[in-house]
Image (cartoon, rainbow, N blue to C red):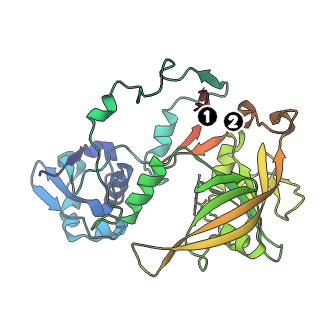
Amino acid sequence: MSRPQLIINPRCIGLHLHYARLGHSLLDHGMCRSCFTVSVASSTQSTPLVAHAANTEYSCGALLNNQTDLNYRDHSVAYLNRISFQLRRPLSTTPIMSKAHPDFEQLQASRPDFRHDAEVIVSKSPNPTWKQGDGANDGGESLKKEHVEIDPYADGRPVASNYKLLISGMVPRPISLISTQSADGKTTNLAPFSYSQIVNHDPPMFVVGFVGSLEKAKDTLKNLNETKECVINIISEHFLEAANSTSINAPYGHSEWEVSGLTQGPTSVVKPARVKESIFAVEGKLVEVKEFESRANPGQPSSVLAIIEGVRFWVREDAIDKDQSVIDLEVLKPISRLGGISYGRTTDVIEIPRPQF
Ligand SMILES: Cc1cc2nc3c(=O)[nH]c(=O)nc-3n(C[C@H](O)[C@H](O)[C@H](O)COP(=O)(O)O)c2cc1C
């Protein structure tokens, strides 16, 4: 079977092409460096570059250090006809943007402005005349397509591919902007987590997944595990940039409240502050943590699940109905997490009654 090939015009990567950018470019096309071999064709000579490896995530430096790369450096962009990437397996060519996208500012500038006046539109369902037994509403179109079977731990498949696949496929996800404080009460912390979900209402139960281990815990997990307290704040459109900024990899003890410019609001059952800008916040107490072992590196803890009970709710006055039971979507304007660095807004709603047997 011939290998799929993606050809990128060198000019797309930039006139001052160098290896670091080449590496970024591959990542932007959803590829990990362990998934491709590179060959560069110039008008003067064809120089094969081999830049693949078994399981390791290659840094740009690794590409630079590859001996065959040196040949490539001698060519000026003018002589380059094409750069082709021989993929070791088919991968999506849909760009998954990383923060390191070299042309992100340019790309962002070319996009339309945020539609502040976007209203929530409730439409009919795709097939309003659907009846029991009708199946999918696409007339069988989806059945004409084949599926690709993926073993998450297939030989040579990097763990990063599972991460990208899962966060782009399990969408949209709610984002918990979690506020905690240290056991001695001296430092505060705020960070977003989208491996998060409500799992029950009586008692109100929430789960949050932390990448890493209890020993090398993210600041939020360290504080949560030590104090057993947190506040889960739901992110709304009006403070998206500030919420995103709290994902900064600040050292322990450095407060993301300052980085974000968000405002601390009072809480009553737990010590950490809630985000005052947040329309909906939940004071939470830690019920349990469970550490998971990596399959890629057996014996190594790789993630921690925290189960949190909600003990107090805070809802902005104009978002709650008179029974204090329903939050108005038009006021909440929730932001969800999609794949890569994409966020989603919820402005398109469909209502369908539940069936009765
Ligand atoms: C929208 C968004 C969602 C995120 N979700 C998670 C997640 O579910 N689990 C995780 O471990 N990290 C997640 N992160 C990364 C953390 O926010 C990031 O590592 C942060 O620096 C952790 O901060 P802390 O060390 O102060 O707790 C997410 C980042 C963003 C921007």
Q: Residues within 10 Å of mark 1 (few under 14, many from 20)?
A: some
Residue that label 2 marks: 333
Q: Residue at x 77, y 45 (%)?
A: 280
Please tell me whether residue 141 is drawn above or below residue 157 in the rendered image: above
Q: Residue 5, position in %: x, y?
A: 20, 48
Left or right: residue 7 versus residue 335 is left
Give the labeled residue for mark 1.
346
Q: Quadrant of residue 186?
A: bottom right
Residue 217 or residue 255, whichever sits in front: 217
Outermost residue to the front:
357
Q: Residue at x 55, y 71 (%)?
A: 212
Mark 2 Cα shell of 10 Å, populated few (<14), some (14-19), many (≥20): some
Tally of marks: 2
Q: Secondary structure at mark 1?
A: loop
Q: Quadrant of the C terminus?
A: top right
Whether residue 39 is visible to the viewer of this picture, yes or no, is yes
Find residue 222 and report its horizontal and vertical position in percent. Answer: 68, 73
Looking at the picture, does residue 283 appear above or below residue 78? Answer: below
Residue 294's disc is: none
Question: Does the residue at mark 1 contact the one at mark 2 (Cβ under 8 Å)?
Answer: yes
- Mark 1 vs mark 2, CA separation in Å: 7 Å
